[in-house]
Amino acid sequence: MRLPVSFVPTCLLALGACRGGAAAPPPDQPRPAPAIVMRAVDDGAFLLADNANIFADTARRVIRDSVEWKSLWRQAVGRQLSPPPRPVVDFGAQVVIFAAAGRMKLGDAIHIDSVGARDNLTVIVIRTTKACHGMPSDAFPFEMAVLPRIVGRVQFREHVLQAPTCP
């Protein structure tokens, strides 16, 4: 039995329509960038956290060399009676992330939460948690963490939350 010539293309079109999934975007439209997979910063990565009135302004920094690291550490621990030694950082393989919240209330906190990368972009999530009824005195929370070396652009993303104990 011979099928009409027009039957074969019709069947192929029908099979293509039934293959499931989304159709490929037209060639003139760019494909969406893949999602950045975020991972929590390991507990062992944290170098120092404090509420002392040292860093009065909000700051987000990536420290990439020992000169800047030495200066930041000296400023961070300079008012302590017995300052801890500066942690050794291998800037060939690592960077230090610094996040300061500026003036807040006691009970408020800042945390270097997670990191993810894609192509030439690294995203660092900073989480600021505000206490329900902060103590009447001021605090200036800051935190430092060491991460694997970052190449390319860095983008900080901010998440501000109420403490989970708030009504």
Image: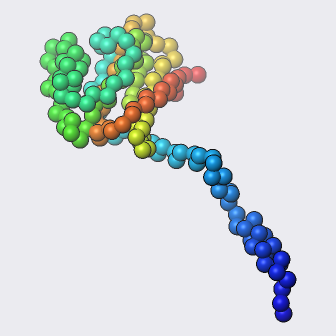
Q: Position of residue 106 (x, y in %)?
A: 40, 14
Is 152 displayed left or right of 35 in the figure?
A: left
Which scheme is used to colour this image of the protein?
Answer: rainbow
Residue 61 occupies quadrant = top left
Q: Position of residue 91 (x, y in %)?
A: 21, 36
Q: Nearer the viewer, residue 13 or 113?
A: 13
Does residue 131 appear in the picture of this structure? yes
Is 116 displayed left or right of 3 in the figure?
A: left
Q: Nearer the viewer, residue 128 or 63?
A: 63
Q: Quadrant of the N terminus?
A: bottom right
User: In the figure, 134 relative to 42: above or below?
Assistant: above
Q: Position of residue 17 (x, y in %)?
A: 75, 65
Task: Identify the residue at image location x=82%, y=81%.
Answer: 5
Task: Identify the residue at image location x=21%, y=39%.
Answer: 92
Residue found at the very far front of the displayed protein: 5
Q: Position of residue 88 (x, y in %)?
A: 16, 33
Does residue 39 appear in the picture of this structure? no
User: In the figure, 86 relative to 28: above or below?
Assistant: above
Task: Identify the residue at image location x=65%, y=56%.
Answer: 24
